Image (cartoon, rainbow, N blue to C red):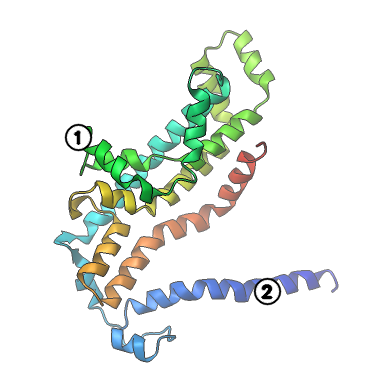
Amino acid sequence: MKRALPSVAAYAVAIPVAAAFLFPYAWMLSGAFRRTRDVLSDPLRLWPEQWNLDVLEDIGRIGGVPLWSFVANSLLYTALATVIGTLAAALGAYAIVRKPHLPGFRWLRAGFLLTVMYPYMLLVIPVYIVMHKIGLLGSPLGIVLFLCLGPIQFFLFEQFFRAIPKEVIEAATIDGASEWQILLRIVLPMAMPVTATVSLIGFLLTWAQWFPVLVISRGPETYTLPVALLSLNTELGASFQGIMALAVITTLPPAILFLLAQRRVMQGMAQGAVKG
């Protein structure tokens, strides 16, 4: 009985805390089917007075663009940015760990990690100018390339590669393996847990980005779901149902993915931070 008391106490604390965190999402889901006047008269009610489906018309087209276009853009941009960003972070981190004394590598690493503290808001003018100069302003490719930036992913890869015993790399070098063979046949197979974690983190972070997409885009045809949510708020004003419904659609995929993979994410973060 005494051994069960700590577990009972932990659940007694965890359940109310979990309910408190889930309440806003449940309220948002309920609000998608409640009229604005009903919400204002009874704001804490979770079960709709009547199921109002006018929201389907509100979010069916936003700015003349169908909803499925925003969903497709979000999935496409996030998938491409996650794959390219993970590959670039892995290659860059491996190169810096293996050849730290090459010219410019030390400054490159410092600049890359500096972006962790650099807010996106300060990148508006330089990003706009660069994308205009290279002809990618308003194009999906420009959006994907900017979303590939992943300082946290780079940091996790770098810390993991530094933790690999040097004897493993030296043994492969003595056996005549090239740098690419060492990377592809030895290092990356060892880094599969961190690679999976970096991919998940990249997906979660990229999906939520709205500011870079808004800066680079020239029209709603290249908008993602978060940007469409922002546009919905400005175009429809007080369309409470539309905002809540689109918010549910926008947050549902990353929420499900994180719930399914949260343990791996935490383990990968711990592995990547073994050595600082």
Three-letter code for the amino acid on which mark 2 is drawn: Val
Which element carries disc 1, helix, strand or loop? loop
- Place of residue 148 in the rendered image (x, y in percent of width and height, measured from the top left): 38, 39
Task: Using residue 93 as the reference point, say whether residue 217 is left or right of it.
Answer: left
The answer to whether one can see residue 11 in this image is: yes
- Place of residue 17 in the rendered image (x, y in percent of width and height, measured from the top left): 60, 73
- Place of residue 242 in the rendered image (x, y in percent of width and height, measured from the top left): 27, 72
Density class for disc 1 (Cα within 10 Å; few <14, some 14-19, many ≥20) is few
**Above-or-below relation of 132 to 99:** below
Which element carries disc 2, helix, strand or loop? helix
Q: Which residue is mark 1?
A: 135
Three-letter code for the amino acid on which mark 1 is drawn: Gly
Q: Which residue is mark 2?
A: 13
Q: What is the quadrant of the C terminus in the image?
A: top right
Residue name at image x 55 percent, y 29 percent: 189
Task: Using residue 140 as the reference point, say whether residue 271 is left or right of it.
Answer: right
Residue name at image x 56 percent, y 38 percent: 156
Task: Using residue 211 as the reference point, say whether residue 220 is left or right of it.
Answer: left
Q: Nearer the viewer, residue 48 or 242?
A: 242
Q: Nearer the viewer, residue 6 or 217?
A: 217
**Above-or-below relation of 13 to 274:** below
